[in-house]
Image: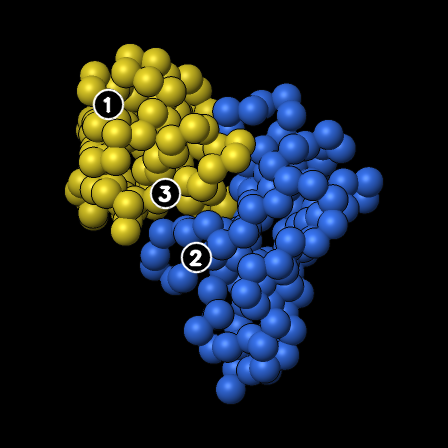
Chain colours: A blue, B yellow
Amino acid sequence: QKEVEQNSGPLSVPEGAIASLNCTYSDRVSQSFFWYRQYSGKSPELIMSIYSNGDKEDGRFTAQLNKASQYVSLLIRDSQPSDSATYLCAVNFSYNTDKLIFGTGTRLQVFP
Amino acid sequence: DAGITQSPRHKVTETGTPVTLRCHQTENHRYMYWYRQDPGHGLRLIHYSYGVKDTDKGEVSDGYSVSRSKTEDFLLTLESATSSQTSVYFCAISEQGPTNEKLFFGSGTQLSVL
């Protein structure tokens, strides 16, 4: 089992819809969770971080964390074609605090 | 953009040759990282540094070495390149470590080993 798992996609949603991206992880006591966005041919950039159970909202983005079920999700409201990218989930595991483990990413396509 | 420069941006080399990739930062951040990104594997940590001359291994360190003689520079060396090391290499920096602060990534180096 991979430590951080994501569906590779592509996830296709129409413009204006809500895109829901999911990530599961293997360590129940992990502390820090991150979502990075990576446009094709570019480097990753951080869009959300979350550390406690529940929802965290930032503009059109909402991160949701459920430590009991070991998943973290990213919701993108009012999706735009400019949101088309690969979204990487990253987890800082409790047993390895100096390192982030990345998932393979989910490719999101938003069509007009 | 964070002040991170990777060089070269692209490199083609032959199997068995040594290769050095350079990461230079102007942010004076303590932590520096080297990742590789491959289809189906995502980003994987090769080596990282938590200070001058302080380095440690990541998930996929075999065949790679690093050095950090100055805060601003972090070098990744492939002593004898193999085709399996064909990849996109990203350098990243952070001030306090990855637990509660963002990583800033460089633009990447596309390395092809023929």
Residues under labels 2 and 3: Cα distance? 12 Å
Q: Nearer the viewer, mark 2 or mark 3?
A: 3
Q: In the rendered structure, are the residues bearing label 1 and label 2 in contact, judged by CB atoms less than 8 Å apart?
A: no
Position above or below: A91 against B108: above
The three-letter amino acid code for the residue at tag 2 is: Gln
In the foreground, A85 or A78? A78
Q: In this orientation, does residue B51 appear? A: yes
- Taking the spot 21% from the left edge, 28% from the top edge, the residue there is B72
The three-letter amino acid code for the residue at tag 3 is: Phe
For the C terminus of chain B, the quadrant is: top left
- Taking the spot 37% from the left edge, 27% from the top edge, the residue there is B31
Position above or below: A83 against B20: below
Q: Chain of mark 2?
A: A
Q: Which residue is mark 2?
A: A38
- Taking the spot 36% from the left edge, 43% from the top edge, the residue there is B104
Q: In the rendered structure, are the residues bearing label 3 and label 1 in contact, judged by CB atoms less than 8 Å apart?
A: no
Q: Nearer the viewer, mark 1 or mark 2?
A: 1
